[in-house]
Image (tube, grey):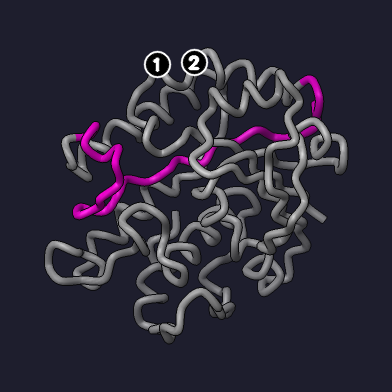
Amino acid sequence: MTNILAIGNSFSRDATAYLYDICENMGLSVHVVNLYIGGCSLERHWSNIERDEKAYQYQENGICTDRYVSISEILRSRPWDYIVTQQSSHDSGWLDTYEPFAGLIFDYIKKEVPGAKICMQQTWAYEIDSDHGCFIRYNRDQQEMYNRSRANYHAIADKYGIQLIPCGDVIQNIRKHPEFDVAKGGKSICRDGFHMHYLYGRYALACTWAKNLLNAPVSDCTYVPKCFDTDEEVDMELLAIVKGEII
């Protein structure tokens, strides 16, 4: 079994919601945990580590629980193979928000779980019409947000030798298809301008994690999301477009 831990926020929730199901569909045995605080930044993660705060909602194999935990408690709970973190989306375009917190977090994880591979999820840019309050920091320009965020994630990954899960690239590539190009009347890959669409967006992220962490043959995946957060029927043609952009 492969143990995957995300120390994140709602963006890692989006990424891990279907990860267990998708891996199971491909015959891959995984245990997936997401530690959730909405909007949590690297700075706050480090503060929580220093204070050993039981501030994270424990989400296991895509299921939210009422349990609240500390990072140290969960690091000791399993022999983690992969530990993934990320910057908060609104800060992702500003390199000075990553440090010194990224380095401190990586050093802490290496000390506590020396056998784990540390990764970062490259987060994505907001939709072109997003009303997120921090989108103005990027001049409400999706391409600017994508470019700035991508450059910063790569800078940190190169500095520390950390593997990047290229979710931001995947989402931006999906948006190039007319079916997902909001400017041309297409469906948004986001559900609210910044979080992922419950069906297509979350599916894209989970497949990206599965391929990049486990080299999973996602083109062979037959799992179809059954999302209870929306009554929308899954369009298999749209799902095929999403799957075709996994890198």
Q: Give the camera-side residue of 205 and 66.
A: 66
Could you tell me which residue is drawn at 75 percent across and 45 percent down? 68
The answer to which quarter of the image holds residue 44 is top right
Measured as percent of width and height from the top left, residue 236 is found at 41, 84
Compared with residue 126, is residue 237 higher up or lower down, i.e. above or below? below
Q: Which residues are magenta?
A: 111-138
Could you tell me which residue is drawn at 70 percent across and 24 percent down? 49
Compared with residue 96, is residue 198 higher up or lower down, i.e. above or below? below
* Quadrant of the drawing holding the C terminus: bottom left
The answer to which quarter of the image holds residue 109 is top right
Could you tell me which residue is drawn at 49 percent across and 57 percent down? 205
Q: Give the camera-side residue of 154 and 102.
A: 102
Residue 132 part of the magenta-drawn span = yes
The answer to which quarter of the image holds residue 9 is top right
Query: In this image, 25 relative to 209: left or right?
Result: right
From the image, tell me which residue sits under label 1. 96
Mark number, residue 99: 2
Specify the farthest residue to the top.
100
Measured as percent of width and height from the top left, residue 189 is found at 34, 63
Query: In this image, 244 relative to 141: left or right?
Result: right
Q: Residues within 10 Å of mark 2 (few under 14, many from 20)?
A: few
User: Do labels 1 and 2 touch, CB within 8 Å?
Assistant: yes
